[in-house]
Amino acid sequence: MPYSYNIHMSPKRRYTDEHAKAGLDFDFPAIETWPNQFPGYEIQIDDPELTSVCPKTGLPDFGLLTIRYVPRKRCLELKSLKEYLFSFRNLGIFQENIVNQVLEDVVKACDPVWATVKGEFRPRGGIGTTVEAHWPRPKA
């Protein structure tokens, strides 16, 4: 009789609610801002070396994070943004949660007209992930 193994039956492979929420209760550093001087333009910021850790496996995740926004009265200060993004380095958090957490924190910091955060994560096990979140959020 051939040996078969169904990974869906193995309890050690199941993701829990704790895995899904991992990293979201972290005390992220504040993103500083400075007064915007001009109306109606777009800013794009790239972090080509974003790193984090999978909360389930403990394996590292690597990605390109892109933030695009139209400032209202405040612009993101880049040094504090860099320090904020460094806080993900050893944090166990899903890629989808990174993108959405960054969006929430960008909006909280500078109240933009609109914002988009996109994460393009390098393949692990042959599968890459791209996650994009938008502000304002769609109505439920």
Image (tube, grey):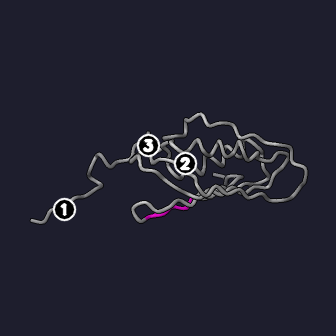
Q: In the rendered view, does 8 fall on the left or right side of 107?
A: left
Q: Which residue corresponds to the image point at 13% horizontal and 66% vertical from the top-left?
A: 2
Number of residues whose C-alpha sits closer than 10 Å to that of mark 3, classed few (under 14), some (14–19) or many (20 or more): some
Q: Quadrant of residue 110?
A: top right
Quadrant in the picture for residue 40: bottom right
Is 87 within the magenta?
no
Residue carrying label 1: 4
Mark 1 crowd level (few <14, some 14–19, many ≥20, 10 Å Cα):
few
Foreground: 31 or 40? 31
The x and y percentages for residue 105 are: 67, 43
Q: Main secondary structure of the magenta part?
A: strand
- Where is residue 46, by image quadrant? bottom right
Q: Whole-percent x and y of residue 118?
A: 62, 58
Check the picture and name the quadrant holding the N terminus. Answer: bottom left
User: Which of pointers 2 and 1 lies earlier in the amino acid sequence?
Assistant: 1
Check disc 1 and report its element: helix, strand or loop.
Answer: loop
Image point (70%, 53%), residue name: 135
Given contact means CB atoms under 8 Å apart, are the residues at marks 2 and 3 in contact?
Answer: no
Residue range in magenta is 127-131
Horizontal and vertical percent position of residue 90: 50, 42
Q: Which amino acid is tagged 2?
A: Asn
Q: Give the label on residue 116, or none.
A: none
Q: Label 1 near label 2: C-beta < 8 Å? A: no
The residue wearing badge 3 is 19
Q: Could you give the CA–CA distance between mark 2 and mark 1, rounded to whole angstroms?
A: 34 Å
Q: CA distance from mark 2 to mark 3?
A: 11 Å
> Counting residues from the N terminus, which is met first, the one under dot 1 or under dot 3?
1
Q: Residue at x 56, y 44 (%)?
A: 88
Which residue type carries mark 1?
Ser
**Residue at label 2?**
97
x, y percent for residue 55? 44, 44
